[in-house]
Amino acid sequence: MDTDKVFKALGDPTRRRLLDLLCDKNGQTLGQLCENLDMARQSATQHLGILEEANLVSTVRRGREKLHFINPVPLHEVYERWVRKFERQRLSLLHDLKKELEGE
Amino acid sequence: MTKETTSFVYVTYILSTPEKVFEAITKPDVARRYWGHENVSDWKLGSKWEHIRANDERTVELVGKVVEVSPPTRLVITWANASQASDPEAYSRVTFEIEEYEDMVRLTVTHDELEAGSGMANGISKGWPAVLSSLKSFLETGRGLDVFAKPKAA
């Protein structure tokens, strides 16, 4: 939704760790996530809030539990805008170089 | 035997209306423009739907049934590889929820009842982010992204 929020959310090792944890196992509760983090539940909640605000994490209530899911859609948008564009240029340079070296 | 299942929840915010988003999923001539596929059905409860590659071969890649339909806010379908259509265990479930969110639409796609570690679970986890980014781009700018894009081989 907001690219600044995505980059800001990613600019913290704990939040990247949370995304890795959800990538390994999607749909975890706060308690499950905290088992793999060395921090108080309250801090973890704040980090998850920032990730949710950036739309990198979505939550679903199931009974009394709140499950967290990684939402890579904004990452894909960042990839399209900030990675693929430059990658394309680099790959086409390599392609030209190869052609030249092979004397095509 | 009950297999371990996994689920995914994808959310995107689109500057559009619920009607347009619903149409983009269910109308073949819209879906082909950002998805490279068409979702073909009469979208009635219990009807079949097919996910067809929008090229000359028109391969049916996925099949399923319409489980719930209430335009323009909710659609639930089952989902399986066309090659596994006769295996009830191969079916997973996809729920589209479309809600107004300020001047935007919040689209949530929940894909669950997937067999953990299956080819389908792996495939959709790569597919949905690309399709949803492309849908957003298409509805906001009139241009979808290339959902089949791969790094250019040198």
Image (cartoon, helix red, strand yellow):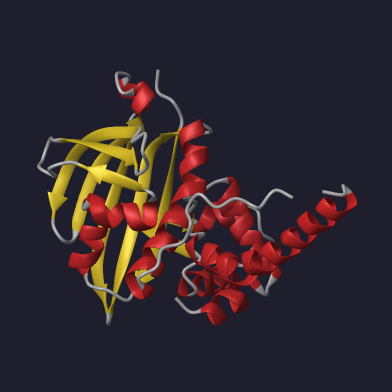
Q: Is residue B15 left or right of residue B116?
A: left
Q: Establish if B64 lies above or below B37.
A: above
Residue at 70%, 68% in the rendered image: A13
Determine which quarter of the picture holds residue B141. bottom left
The total of numbered circles placed on residues is 0
Q: Residue furthest right?
A: A101
Q: Is residue B116 or residue A76 the one in the foreground?
A: A76
Q: Position of residue A79 (x, y in %)?
A: 59, 65
Query: Residue at point 48% right, 59% down?
Result: A71
Residue A66 visible in this rendered orientation of the protein: no
> Which one is nearer the viewer's eye here, B150 or B108?
B150
Rendered view: A39 above or below A46: above
Residue B7 relative to residue A56: left or right: left
Residue B44 in percent (x, y) is at: 10, 42
Q: Residue at x 53, y 75 (%)?
A: A50
Residue at coordinates 50% horizontally, 49% vertically from top-left?
A: B148
Q: Nearer the viewer, residue A40 or B19?
A: B19
Q: Residue furthest left?
A: B44
* Residue B59 x %, y %: 35, 33
**Direction from residue B59 to residue B127 in the image, left or right:** right
Left or right of residue B70: residue B2: right
Q: Is residue B91 above or below residue A8?
A: above
Residue A38 percent location from the top left of the image = 69, 61
Q: Is residue A78 visible?
A: yes
Q: Residue furthest front?
A: A104
- Where, quadrant-wise, is the N terminus of chain B in this rendering? top left
